[in-house]
Amino acid sequence: MRDDLDLWLEDLESPEAARWVADRNTETLAGYQDPAFARLRDTLREVLDSKERLTVPGWRGDGLYYDFRQDADHPRGLWRRTTADEFRRDEPEWDVLLDVGALNRAEDENWTWSDVTVLRPGYDRCLISLARGGADAVVVREFDLRDRVFVADGFTLPEAKSSVSWIDADHIFVATDFGPGTATSSGYPRVVKRWRRGTPLAEAETIFEGEPGDVSVRAFHDPTPGYERDLVVRYSDFFHSERHLLRPDGTLDRVEVPGDAVCELHREWLLVRLRSPWGAFPAGALLASPADRHDFAVLFEPDARTSLQGWQWTRDHLLLVTMTDVRTRVDVLTPGFPEWSRQPLSGADGFDHTGIVETDPDNGNAYLLLSTGHLSPAALTLGTVGGPAEVIKRSPAFFAAEGLSVRQFFATSADGTRVPYFVVGGEPGGPVMLEGYGGFEVALTPGYDGVGGRGWLARGGIRVVANIRGGGEYGPAWHQAAMRANRPRAYEDFAAVATDLVDRGIATPQRLGIAGGSNGGLLMGVMLTRYPELFGAVVAAVPILDLRRYHLLLAGRSWVAEYGDPDVEQDWAYLREFSPYQNVRPGRPYPPVLFITSTRDDRVHPGHARRMAALLLRHGYDVSYYENVEGGHGAAADNEQAATIEALTMEFLWRRLGGSPGGDAVDGDAVRGVEAEQAGELGT
């Protein structure tokens, strides 16, 4: 039975499986030992390691700018901070808090940076999450920000998929693996506890337990002065949750909103973003009400072309990001009742995409924006609501954009739906790389890609980004149109874009390659097995490929709400029609395919890619396979690994689509002459 074929490749501890991986890696890399590939890899790493690369900082509430930075001198990265005035300088002086590489050498470890939670207020302690080899599972360790040392006998958690939140200097909320029965079937925490400093973790007080079939639970403390509160969140599936206020006596008061809504409490306000209709309010709307009663005002209501992409509070205002046909705008809303005032946010126009990087709601109405476009290097804007806005940092140009353009088209899918896509590049004729994702309400938005620009566009390639259903480009309806049994709508959309590219003379099937990762890797697998005649080559990174077994592997159970449950007969009836692994057939015109994954990916099991590659090889197809030994779901733990994977992806497609080895990969000297000109175009 095919479902049981090559299951030994799922064993991450198996010497036989490790040898199989090593053999496949050797076979694949043997084709890329030439100087042309080395030049491409090195020029891509130059972009990743560039000291001029834009620093996008984080704010913690203490007035400082925090950043985690990886470069050639510090491949595992530095966690650092500086003052607001110093950050504005061309070469800021950074205060290094933690050198991950030095920590690895001191502890003989393989740590990669994952996350940090800073004590607020106080800002003198933090909880740092470190992962081995880039995995999702982390070790949590308390760190002293004044003395720059890990706290002896401080809060420490062993390796697990954990969630932590400060309550005060001596207490934290912790959700982790407390032992047998405390994880959900998705592998995330099922139990959350309150842990007091100086006591064993085993003695921490349980405040909430979810169900074994939930995705996860967590708790967090809101320290906003005058509005202090504790909340517990139970995620029953990927899109449904319950939020409860935790009272001092340990009782829980549920926040009464729809289970599939996203809600947030800020000071005296409750925000609710709907995924489905609620009374007279439509799906995709954003509502606001005083937190002590339900008296909702509509802050945003979607239409056929416009959706809500996000929001952030300043102290007194709400910044709202909306998107119309995959181009954003940012408005500032000021609370009032029953009407809120609205006006465009200063500093947010003139780009294809603008996102909110940071606000400082404890202290004022400042904001930090990141604005960018496919050919527009990113700009960092600092402003204050009601005050001035100023571009304080700009990314350099990493490739020459002369002769290149960005065009948006709409393809018509099988059911008549108009599907937007962007075409980036010069005149048609070169290889075309089409990318897509189409899942979990994740939108693919315009953004400057120095690596892709230098490694693909600068040597004559064309890049295409398809905004297919399943994503979040047009809100919940766009996502839900390709969920579960409707998943094929996403695949029909992607095929429609491919066909439209050919009809417009931008590509031919032989010169059209495709690439995607994770859920986008599933998309690639379906394109390979259902639409092989449309493409000349395929790259699937950290892919989901076996929908018969995905829910049994690592975090797979958490995606059942998106795909369906293969153990339910009605769900398997539709899943088996497009599950890539189950639909491999002999004698089909499958194009060459490259699978990329990571041994340390503890989200999407590398067994998906391993078994799919083995099955295709058994049928005699043209299959390349590369598995990085670390890197987690991102497949790379440092810039050297990332450059290798990016170069392998681009060069595989370039050569299989008819380009010469190495093409005309551009080095850094070729673009430095245009940096000043492009920076001037950004203005202030």
Image (cartoon, rainbow, N blue to C red):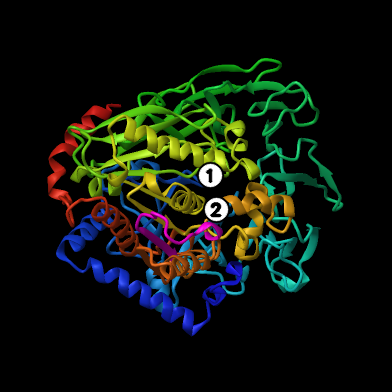
As helix, strand or loop, the secondary structure at mark 1 comes to: loop
Q: Is residue 70 left or right of residue 264?
A: left
| Tag 2: amino acid | Tyr
Residue 393 percent location from the top left of the image: 31, 38
Residue 445 percent location from the top left of the image: 43, 36
Residue 92 percent location from the top left of the image: 30, 48
* Residue occupying image coordinates x 21% and y 69%: 33
Tag 1 residue: 61
Mark 1 vs 2: CB contact within 8 A: yes
| Tag 1: amino acid | Gly
As helix, strand or loop, the secondary structure at mark 2 comes to: loop
Seen from the viewer's position, the closer of residues 461 and 526 is 526
**624 falls in the magenta region:** no
**585 falls in the magenta region:** yes
Please rate how many residues cluster around mark 1, counting C-alpha atoms within 10 Å: few if below 14, some from 14 to 19, many from 20.
Answer: some
How far apart marks 1 and 2 lie (CA) works out to 8 Å
Q: Residue furthest front?
A: 587
Please rate how many residues cluster around mark 2, counting C-alpha atoms within 10 Å: few if below 14, some from 14 to 19, many from 20.
Answer: some
Sequence-first tag of 1 and 2: 1
* Residue occupying image coordinates x 17% and y 54%: 660
Tag 2 residue: 123
Question: Which residues lie in the magenta part?
Answer: 581-597
Q: Quadrant of residue 192?
A: bottom right
* Residue occupying image coordinates x 78% and y 45%: 244
Asked whether the viewer can see residue 229, the reply is: no
